Image (cartoon, rainbow, N blue to C red):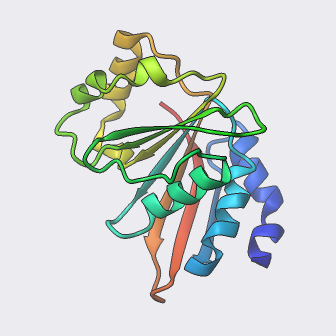
Amino acid sequence: MDDFLTLKNTLQEVFDDNDLNKELSIEVTLSDLSSFAQFIASYLKAGDWLFLDGDLGAGKTSLTKELSSILGARQQSISPTFSILNIEELNSETDLKKLIHLDLYRLKSGRELLYLGLEEEFNPKNTLCVFEWPYNIENDDYLDFFKITKCAKPKRVIEITLELAEKEDVRIYHIKRTHF
């Protein structure tokens, strides 16, 4: 847990600096996941897109569930593996009022993004989007999505790549800003 606090300034730079070369890596035990998610949640803002990438079982959905709970979801978050998209209303004291959780694992092409209704739900003034398997969609497909739907682009795109560590109860989180 002390690792989170000592890295606070670095994390602030990753989230707020326009220099996309800054990256932070941190090991987190499963017992510290809630505290880590609390720390990450404190940096999230309305209009952000959070890209969660990593192997099956790395903890993408677990992190999203923790974030959802911390941000005040009215119901228990569930995985959108089969529905592809879940929308959660938030009882947040911040600008965040809605969390859109997408699991793009089953998409066959980036064109399918056009049929999810994301442009109807995403509002950069009050919404956070969390994407699992974001790189199942090519960058050009995201750009086409914005062009065709006129959906607002996210204010920030934060990528967290989760990696299984040698110890079974540890994950390595690589955090950086990215862009379209």
The residue that appears at 29% across and 50% down in the rendered structure is 81
179 or 1, which is in the foreground?
A: 1
Q: Position of residue 8 (x, y in %)?
A: 81, 60
Occupied quadrant, residue 108:
top left
Q: Position of residue 70 (x, y in %)?
A: 67, 54
Farthest left residue in view: 108
Please give left or right for residue 177 compared with residue 39 in the image: left
Please give left or right for residue 12 compared with residue 146 in the image: right
In this picture, is 174 found above or below 100?
Answer: below
In this picture, is 162 found above or below 151?
Answer: below
The residue that appears at 51% across and 24% down in the rendered structure is 122
Q: Count how many numbered circles sit on residues in the image.
A: 0
Point out the image quarter for the N terminus: bottom right
Farthest bottom residue in view: 167
Farthest front residue in view: 75
Occupied quadrant, residue 37:
bottom right
The residue that appears at 64% across and 32% down in the rendered structure is 97
Occupied quadrant, residue 150:
top left
In this picture, is 35 found above or below 52?
Answer: below
Q: Position of residue 96 (x, y in %)?
A: 67, 34
Please give left or right for residue 129 compared with residue 146 in the image: right
The residue that appears at 55% across and 62% down in the rendered structure is 174
152 or 161, which is in the foreground?
A: 152
59 or 162, which is in the foreground?
A: 59
Q: Position of residue 36 (x, y in %)?
A: 67, 66
